[in-house]
Structure formats: C-alpha cells, structure tokens
Amino acid sequence: ARLVESGGGLVQPGGSLRLSCPGSGFISSVFNPMHMPWSRQAPGKEREMVATISNNGNTNYADSVKGRFTIPRDNAVKKMYLRMNSLTVEDSGVYYCNAYESQNAYWGQGTQVIVAS
C-alpha cells in the first residue's frame, strides 16, 4: 500500500490548485480508520502541518491556511484531497500527504507547488 500525491504545479498568486492523494493498494478496512494530514516544506524551512482530517471527518487547519484550504476525503474511492484557494507565494513548497493509525504510517513522495507571478 502506498500514497501517491498529484496535482502540484505552477500557479499565480490568487490562484487555486487541488492536490490529490489516492491510497493505492489499501483495502477499505485499512484506509477508513486512517487519520490523514497534509504537510508542506518550503526550501530552508521545517516541514509544517497544513491540514488534517481524522477518520471520523473532523478537520483541523494551520492558522495560515484557514478559510483558504479544505481537506475533503472520499473513503469510497480511498482518496484524500487538499483544495487550495487564494494561494500566496508563502504557500510554495513540497506538499506531502500522510496516513496513519495506531500501528502503521504511510507517506507519499510529495508534490511541488510553486506560487509565482
């Protein structure tokens, strides 16, 4: 089982992107209980949590993205998303999705987001 992010790219300030994180090879009984955060890492900075969705749908967002980002998940197709609106240059970085529960954790390889005019 693995996570493979996609959807990154170059976007102008004020633009939008949707990142996708499908759980490849997961069965529902493994995927559904997972808590799933998105994190990002900008050059020269530490990785930071951007948003998290729990296995019961509760969400939590970093202050810097509240009101601009949402983190839906679709257990039926074993996917989690990060919808990003009103992007700023400070949102640039490599974005990683993660899935974990008490005994297992999985990481994707990251997808790069560049916000520039």
Image: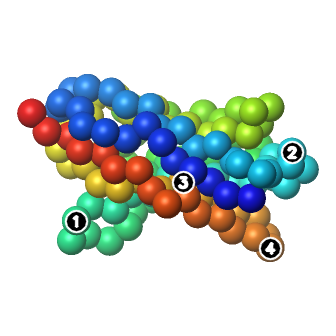
Give left or right: position of 96 versus 107: left
What's the residue at 18%, 30% (across, down)?
Answer: 12
Category of crowding for the residue at label 4, using alpha-carbon neighbours closer than 10 angstroms: few (below 14), some (14–19), many (at least 20): few
Category of crowding for the residue at label 3, using alpha-carbon neighbours closer than 10 angstroms: few (below 14), some (14–19), many (at least 20): many
Dot 1 amino acid type? Pro
Instruction: Specify which label sits upstream in the sequence, 2 or 1.
Output: 2
Q: Provide the residue designation for mark 2.
A: 28
> Where residue 51 appears, x then y in whole percent?
50, 48
Instruction: Specify which label sits upstream in the sequence, 3 or 2.
Output: 2
SS of the residue at dot 1? loop
| Distance CA(mark 1)–CA(mark 3) | 18 Å
What's the residue at 9%, 33% (across, down)?
Answer: 117
Residues marked 4 and 3 touching at CB (< 8 Å): no
Residue 103 is marked as 4
Instruction: Specify which label sits upstream in the sequence, 2 or 4.
Output: 2
SS of the residue at dot 3? strand
Q: Which colour scheme is used?
A: rainbow
> Which image quarter: residue 56?
top right
| Distance CA(mark 2)–CA(mark 1) | 35 Å
User: Which-is-in-front pick, marks 2 and 4?
Assistant: 2
Dot 3 amino acid type? Cys
> Where residue 116 appears, x then y in whole percent?
14, 39
| Distance CA(mark 3)–CA(mark 2) | 18 Å
